[in-house]
Image (cartoon, rainbow, N blue to C red):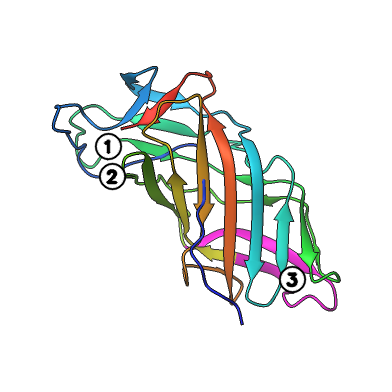
Amino acid sequence: MFKKKPIMVVGLAAIVLSGLASTSALGVTAGWRVNGRLLEGTKALARRPAASHTTITTATGTRILCSGTVIVMPDGGVIINPPQPPPPPLPPPWINPGKIVFEECSATEPEACKLKSASIETVPLSYVELTLEGALAARGVIKPSTKTTLYTVGFEGEKCALSGVQPATGSLGFLLPEAQDERTTQTIAVSTSSGQFKIGSSEAEMHVTYLQALESGEPWSFL
């Protein structure tokens, strides 16, 4: 039986927060900080983060592993702090991942199942709304900018439970476990929640972890 379990996902490069910027007890406006200072405007994310692991597993038993440079942002992801206070309807700090490409992907289970392409590319993604979590983390949700399809995967093979081109639909959880600690690379974990992600008509899970830096190499944080 396919077990549902929460998956933690780290790191896509640009995040957008909606709503009014919060103010701490010390009167400091929440948002992205670079070199210890509140960011004014935008900063580009490194286009090829140091990716560590990506797996996709479906309820039908199909398992996909992407072992290459997993995350790429062809359109250039950014972190953004709008003017304070932000004029409506502009949200406060965001991260915008642009598109993500998973490279060197293959179906590892079942053995007879193959992928039509070794890369999986998402559609343009929406801005991610972030909330602080605990003393260190920040959390959000990744969704497609339009409709419900995040990306498509092509399958081939007589014994493959999924056949043809199948859409991956739903949303992905987005976690920066150490976002409130300034560092040159931030861990990003992307994961699925129970019932929130499918490939074709099959419930699925996706786990991604990687290290994201700014294009400038400066230390950054979200407070």
Q: How far apart are labels 2 and 1 at the CA level?
A: 5 Å
Q: Is residue 15 left or right of residue 216?
A: left
The x, y position of residue 125, in whole percent, is: 49, 48
**Residue at 40%, 25% in the rendered image:** 42
Q: Dot 2: few (<14), some (14–19), or many (≥20) neighbours within 10 Å?
A: some
- Tags 2 and 1 touching, CB below 8 Å: yes
Q: Amino acid at mark 2?
A: Ser
Q: CA distance from mark 2 to mark 3?
A: 38 Å
Task: Give how far across and how far down residue 16 sits, in percent.
Answer: 36, 40
Magenta stretch: helix, strand or loop mostly:
strand
- Tag 1, which secondary structure? loop
Residue drawn 27% across the image and 40% down it: 91
* Closer to us: 133 or 196: 133
Q: Earlier in the sequence, mark 2 or mark 3?
A: 2
207 relative position to 196: left or right: right
152 left or right, relative to 132: right
Badge 1: few (under 14), some or many (20 or more) residues near its Cα, within 10 Å?
Answer: many
Residue designated by label 1: 92
Q: Position of residue 75 (x, y in %)?
A: 56, 35
Q: Secondary structure at mark 3?
A: strand
Q: Identify the magenta region.
A: 148-167
The 10 Å Cα crowd at callout 3, few under 14, some 14 to 19, many 20 or more, is some
- The circle on residue 164 is 3
Between the residue at mark 3 and the residue at mark 1, the CA separation in whole angstroms equals 41 Å
Magenta residue check for 156: yes
Along the line of sight, the residue nearer the viewer: 169 or 183: 183
Q: Nearer the viewer, mark 2 or mark 3?
A: 2
Q: Amino acid at mark 1?
A: Pro
Which residue does the numbered mark 2 point to in the structure image? Answer: 18
